[in-house]
Amino acid sequence: MTKVDFLKNRPIAHRGLFNKEEKIPENSIIAFKRAIEKDYPIELDVHLLKDGKLVVFHDDNLLRMTGVNRKIKECNFNEIKELKLDNTGYKIPLFKDVLELVSGKVPLLIEIKSDRKVGETEKVLLESLKDYKGEFAIQSFNPISLKWLKDNFPKVPRGQLASRFKNDKMCLLRKLFLKNMFLNFITKPDFISYSINDFPNKKLEKFKKNGGLILGWTVKKVSDLEKNIEFFCNIIFENEAVSQLYQGKHDTGKS
């Protein structure tokens, strides 16, 4: 048993079990309720606001999900608490309210979304989780964030998010470091979450060969299940039909 085995028991619902057609927005209380009802672990994203509050939201900018063109880190919660998610009646939830809702019923996979100084969001997040009794793990694209977690909270499961970053605007050297996870020997992640569209990767293969757990993101269509899915220990998914088909073919608890 490792401290991240709980991440492979059931497919993980990306931003909750959301459904745009049914007016159930991503990273919303209703999406998390639906995931709990179906016993799916929940992947979600957290941002630290200007007033120090932690909210569950994916994008750096509010525009796509609320129609308001502002960077979320520049907002106080009172300024955004009435904004509607994706033209529905649901609003941006506080992280503490999501913890209260989930309350250990299913595991949480928490992604740190931040371009702040490393340690600021992480510290608030871990303070929020200090009395939480449920299973959770934290992941980030930023290896320096993982280093901070390793140094300050080494018992908390931490994961490196990565891909080939083909469409990301960044310098070639940084892209090379990130896609090949050159800092893993320092950060020592407990698991890796890697894009299903960017496999194979020799670093990934070595990590799994040495007993590491690897999650594949994001499986959105049934046809995605043909993309080297057998390699991954579990999937982060959208679309419940994908999850049902995947689970029907795999015993994720034994991957």
Image: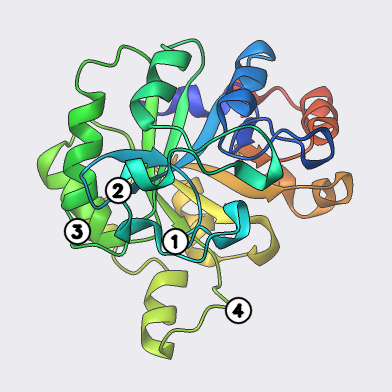
Q: Give the residue type at disc 1.
A: Asp
Q: CA distance from mark 1 to mark 4?
A: 17 Å
What's the residue type where badge 3 is placed?
A: Val
Q: Which residue is mark 1?
A: 60
Residue 52 is situated, as x and y percent measured from the top left of the image, at 21, 44
Residue beneath label 4, please? Answer: 167
Local SS, label 1:
loop
Depth check: give the residue in front, 249 or 134: 134
Quadrant of residue 166 in the image? bottom right
**What kind of residue is marked 4?**
Asn
Q: Is residue 49 left or right of residue 99?
A: left
Which of disc 1 and disc 2 is earlier in sequence? 1
Cβ–Cβ under 8 Å for marks 3 and 4 = no
Q: Is residue 190 visible?
A: no
Label 4 Cα crowd, 10 Å radius (few <14 / some 14-19 / many 20+): few
Residue 134: x %, y % from top left = 37, 14
Kindly report which numbered mark, 1 or 4, lies closer to the viewer in this rendering. 1
Of label 3 and label 2, which has the lower sequence position? 2
As helix, strand or loop, the secondary structure at mark 3 comes to loop
The image shows residue 229, relative to residue 142, as above or below, that is above
Front residue of 182/142: it is: 142
Q: Nearer the viewer, mark 2 or mark 4?
A: 2
